[in-house]
């Protein structure tokens, strides 16, 4: 079955354990080994950075007439959860995921946050297996084909908040995970965003990224109301 995924990706792994690790959700790792370090979360961390860099380089080279702020919003739209989940659906990634029983039972194979994280993990696995050429090949094939040239599709509140506070000098934003609750199949994260050490927004979501976006949205509303 995993060979079908390799065919869909268009890349054959030399070390198949890297791809298997990329498909391992934390709910499965905790359920089987009681060890979240065996999940794909570390790969997701690496893949997120690789994806952001490759997309940023592509936009910089392809759109020399676009200002920094617009390039930032374009990149955010291309690497957001919705866009990456669409990539996962295109290659049938969900059916190959290793999920805990609860996560599987309650729709984890179609949950956008899980699918998006898995895409980033696969990118990292390809990088570790075949170098930047392998990772870039995946990104070019599945992500750089949809560039939001005219209209951005997804709100990126974190970028909007960053641009808002940068209107003044010496502003520092910090996102902090302050709580999480619920079972693996319905986890809720609580995040605070602080401006120069003062909490300006709180958000919740089924992933840390969603919670950060929600916190940024609340912060924008608060800062604009106090302006």
Image (tube, rainbow, N blue to C red):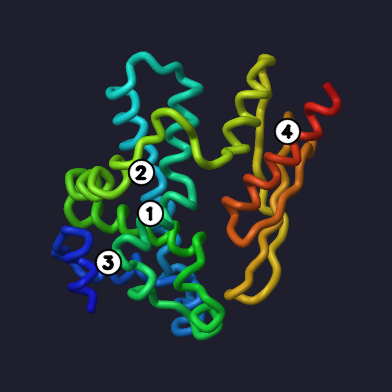
Find numbered disc 3 in the image and state the secondary structure of the residue it sits on. Answer: helix
The answer to whether 171 is drawn above or below residue 97 in the figure is above
The residue beneath circle 4 is 220
Estimate the spatial distance between the alpha carbons at disc 3 and disc 2, rounded to whole Å. Answer: 17 Å
Q: Could you tell me residue 14's position as x and y percent?
A: 13, 64
Mark 1 or 3, nearer chain start:
3
Residue drawn at x 19%, y 66% is: 6
Mark 1 or 2, nearer chain start:
2
Mark 3 or 2, nearer chain start:
3
Q: Nearer the viewer, mark 2 or mark 4?
A: 4
Estimate the spatial distance between the alpha carbons at disc 1 and disc 3, rounded to whole Å. Answer: 12 Å
| Camera-side residue of 134 and 39 | 134
The residue beneath circle 2 is 51
Mark 4 or 3, nearer chain start:
3
The residue beneath circle 1 is 120
Determine contact: label 1, label 2, CB under 8 Å: yes
Find numbered disc 1 in the image and state the secondary structure of the residue it sits on. Answer: helix
The quadrant of the image that shows the N terminus is bottom left
Q: Nearer the viewer, mark 4 or mark 3?
A: 4
The answer to whether 219 is drawn above or below residue 116 in the figure is above
Mark 3 residue crowding within 10 angstroms, few (<14) / some (14–19) / many (20+): many
Residue drawn at x 68%, y 47% is: 214
Q: Which mark is residue 218?
A: none
Q: Could you tell me residue 144's position as x and y percent?
A: 30, 40
């Amino acid at each position: 079955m995993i060979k079908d995924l390799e065919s869909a990706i268009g890349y054959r792994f030399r070390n198949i354990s890297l791809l298997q690790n990329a498909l391992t959700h934390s709910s499965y790792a905790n359920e089987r080994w009681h060890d979240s370090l065996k999940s794909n979360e570390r790969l997701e961390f690496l893949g997120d950075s690789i994806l952001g860099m490759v997309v940023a380089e592509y936009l910089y080279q392809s759109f020399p007439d676009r200002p920094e702020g617009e390039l930032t919003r374009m990149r955010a739209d291309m690497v957001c959860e919705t866009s990456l989940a669409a990539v996962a659906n295109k290659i049938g990634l969900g059916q190959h995921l290793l999920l805990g029983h609860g996560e599987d039972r309650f729709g984890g194979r179609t949950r956008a946050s899980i699918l998006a994280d898995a895409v980033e993990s696969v990118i990292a696995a390809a990088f570790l297996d075949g170098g930047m050429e392998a990772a870039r090949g995946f990104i070019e094939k599945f992500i750089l084909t949809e560039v939001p040239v005219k209209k951005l599709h997804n709100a990126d509140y974190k970028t909007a908040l960053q641009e808002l506070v940068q209107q003044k000098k010496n502003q520092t934003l910090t996102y902090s995970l302050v709580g999480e609750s619920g079972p693996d199949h319905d986890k809720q994260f609580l995040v605070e965003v602080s401006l120069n050490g003062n909490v300006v927004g709180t958000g919740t979501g089924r992933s840390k990224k969603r919670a950060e976006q929600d916190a940024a949205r609340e912060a924008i509303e608060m800062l604009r109301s106090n302006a």
